Image: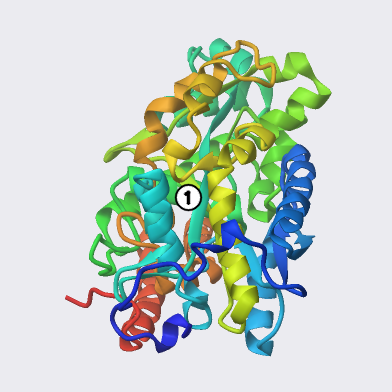
Amino acid sequence: MKAIGKLAVVFLFMTLTIASSAQSAFPDGTAISLLQWRHFVPRHDEWFDGYAAEWGAVNNVAVQIDRVNFAELPATLAAELEAGAGHTIIELISSSAAFVEGLHDLSDINQRALDLYGEQLQHCRNGSYLPALGVYFSFAHGYFFNHGNYDIALWTQAGFPKGPQTYADLLAGGRAIYEVTGIPLGIGLSPEIDSEMALRELLWSFGGSIQDENENVTLDSAATIAAVSYMAQLQQQAMTAEVFGWTGASNNQALIAGEVSFILNPDSAYRSLQNVDEAGAANIGFTPGLAGPAGAIAGSFINSSVIPAYVSGDELRAAKQFILDLSADYSDATYHSELFNLPCFPAAVSELDTWLESDPFGSVPADKFAVLKPALEGLATLGYPGPSNPAIGQAYGEHIIPNMFAQVALGATNAEEAVAQAAQRVEEIFTRWREKGLIGGGQ
């Protein structure tokens, strides 16, 4: 099969060559290797190792699993593509679109999953589908909801017993808590994954975005300037300078230590707190997306698998079957991740609604997660309101959004200049990829 970068406009055939492989073992000597990130919920990796071994035994495939810190995955993928050799499947939680020219088209297994499980959530499709070519560069099997986590006692004392519901609440309540207790808010302004998503949620909820639904650059706008100005005020009045140097683990660590009153994050920090301080965990509440002038637009990280173009033959067939079979077993992935991994194909996890209403892992109250349910089908991901295309992936890799926000919060420049500079770089990136024919827009 050709890599995406060599494809014509569409595939002539959408049928799976692997359709019969689930009924018979692969030839002796077939092997696949997976590169994953070390999961924030350790139970998941313990389950996955057993799942992969069992799958391999059933299908006569040797399965090797390697894990690294999630921040190392993009660079590792880039190096393996450059070398033309490496892992069979690479699993990412940030956009892989910028690597599209070195990846296999996975439209066949995406279509098969649609046939088997029904509708895929739109934010998952946006994170894996390339409209310019009409192909899928990855397979999105799960996602992580980047919701609010707040200290119930602190926010109740500040007059917000259900936590902040809007960005105006976040400023008013967060500032009041900080002034009285010295405990700040915990939203990063650093070139790392959680800052990237939190700042995009703010941007979207103020009506700004990097692109529109047709892949035209829209970053330089009054809405973006308003969002950047708001964040500068929030940092200066309700946070410390530590957020400028945060890593992807910093907000988790701060919440667990009781050092912040609010973070935007999936449930990994909360689950870790459950393991060390049950009373502390009971004092954490959840909020869905905070509302800004344009509404409440919550973000999600897409957990997707890609197959490099150097993979071929039985290895390729086995890799596709492994990915497809994992989606069939996604109830186990959701359960063993303690509801961190949510399904891109909701029909594949029929138990999800029950688990959200009554957490199987001992939350107090048992329905702590239920408040998140209404938001699950309307989430956004990188590229909103358009697709997560290669230009969006490159902009993410260059950390243009957190750098834009941080420069203003640090007082290095004003909002108008920071936005204009960021928009100019984004335009350059979009022009490059548009000239390759890999994104739309340009109108």
Q: Which of 41 and 232 is in front in this view?
A: 41
- Quarter assignment of residue 430: bottom left
Which residue is drawn at the image coordinates 52% and 61% (left, top)? 407
Q: Position of residue 230 (x, y in %)?
A: 41, 44
- Quarter assignment of residue 362: top right
Q: Is residue 340 above or below residue 241?
A: above
Query: Along the horizontal axis of the image, is 240 left or right of 105?
Result: right
SS assignment at label 1:
helix
Q: Is residue 177 visible?
A: yes
Q: Where is residue 37 in the image (x, y as percent from the top left)?
A: 71, 56
Which residue is drawn at the image coordinates 65% and 42% (left, top)? 240
Q: Is residue 174 above or below residue 91?
A: above
Which residue is drawn at the image coordinates 53% and 28% (left, top)? 175
Residue at the extreme front of the image, as rendered: 24
- Quarter assignment of residue 443: bottom left
Q: Nearer the viewer, residue 316 or 156?
A: 316
Q: In this view, does 72 lie above or below 232?
A: below
Q: Name the residue under label 1.
A: 199
Q: Position of residue 252 (x, y in %)?
A: 70, 39
Three-letter code, disc 1 = Leu
Which residue is drawn at the image coordinates 30% and 71% (left, top)? 134
| Residue count near mark 1 (Cα–Cα under 10 Å), binned few <14, some 14–19, many ≥20 | many
